[in-house]
């Protein structure tokens, strides 16, 4: 999704972009079975704990352009 953004793709490319810093934690509401009833199933929980369920930030830099951006990952 990042590389489809016209403004970002001017300064960053997938081949030359690097993660400079990051801080991510699993979302606190991940155990909320009222909001996510599928989490009552242990098999589902095992296979569906990934970065889409995190909150935090990434600091990314591009080697060719020297551009730097902060990407904030919000809890859903």
Image (tube, rainbow, N blue to C red):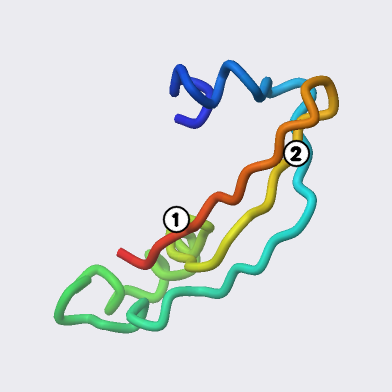
Instruction: Judge by depth and name the residue closer to the eye, 61 or 44.
Output: 61
Tell me the quarter of the image containing the N terminus: top left
Q: CA distance from mark 2 to mark 1?
A: 21 Å
Q: Residue 3: percent from the left, percent from the top? A: 53, 23
Horizontal side of 29 relative to 37 (left or right) equals: right
**Can you identify the residue that label 1 sits on?**
52
Residue 70 in the image: above or below residue 27: above
Residue visible at 63% across and 43% down in the picture: 69
Residue visible at 44% across and 23% down in the picture: 5
Q: Residue 51: percent from the left, percent from the top? A: 53, 57
How many numbered tags mark residues here? 2
Q: Quadrant of residue 43?
A: bottom left
Q: Decide: few, some or many residues near mark 1? Use Cα within 10 Å; few <14, some 14-19, many ≥20.
A: few
Residue visible at 39% across and 75% down in the picture: 42
Q: Secondary structure at mark 2?
A: strand
Label placed on residue 61: 2
Q: Residue 32: percent from the left, percent from the top? A: 26, 82
Q: Secondary structure at mark 1?
A: helix
Instruction: Judge by depth and name the residue closer to the eye, 22 or 37.
Output: 22
Instruction: Judge by depth and name the residue closer to the eye, 7 or 25.
Output: 7
Tell me the quarter of the image containing the C terminus: bottom left
Instruction: Judge by depth and name the residue closer to the eye, 3 or 35.
Output: 3
Q: Earlier in the sequence, mark 2 or mark 1?
A: 1
Tag in front: 2 or 1: 2
Q: Residue 39: percent from the left, percent from the top? A: 30, 74
Q: Quadrant of residue 41?
A: bottom left
Residue visible at 37% across and 67% down in the picture: 75
Horizontal side of 23 relative to 30 (left or right) equals: right
Query: Which residue is situated farthest in the right direction here?
Result: 63
């Amino acid at each position: 999704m990042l590389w489809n953004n016209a403004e970002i793709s001017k300064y960053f490319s997938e081949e030359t972009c690097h993660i400079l810093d990051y801080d991510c934690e699993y979302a606190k509401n991940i155990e909320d079975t009222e909001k996510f009833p599928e989490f009552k199933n242990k098999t589902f929980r095992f296979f569906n704990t990934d970065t889409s369920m995190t909150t935090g930030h990434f600091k990314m830099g591009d080697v060719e352009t020297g551009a730097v951006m902060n990407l904030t990952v919000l809890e859903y």
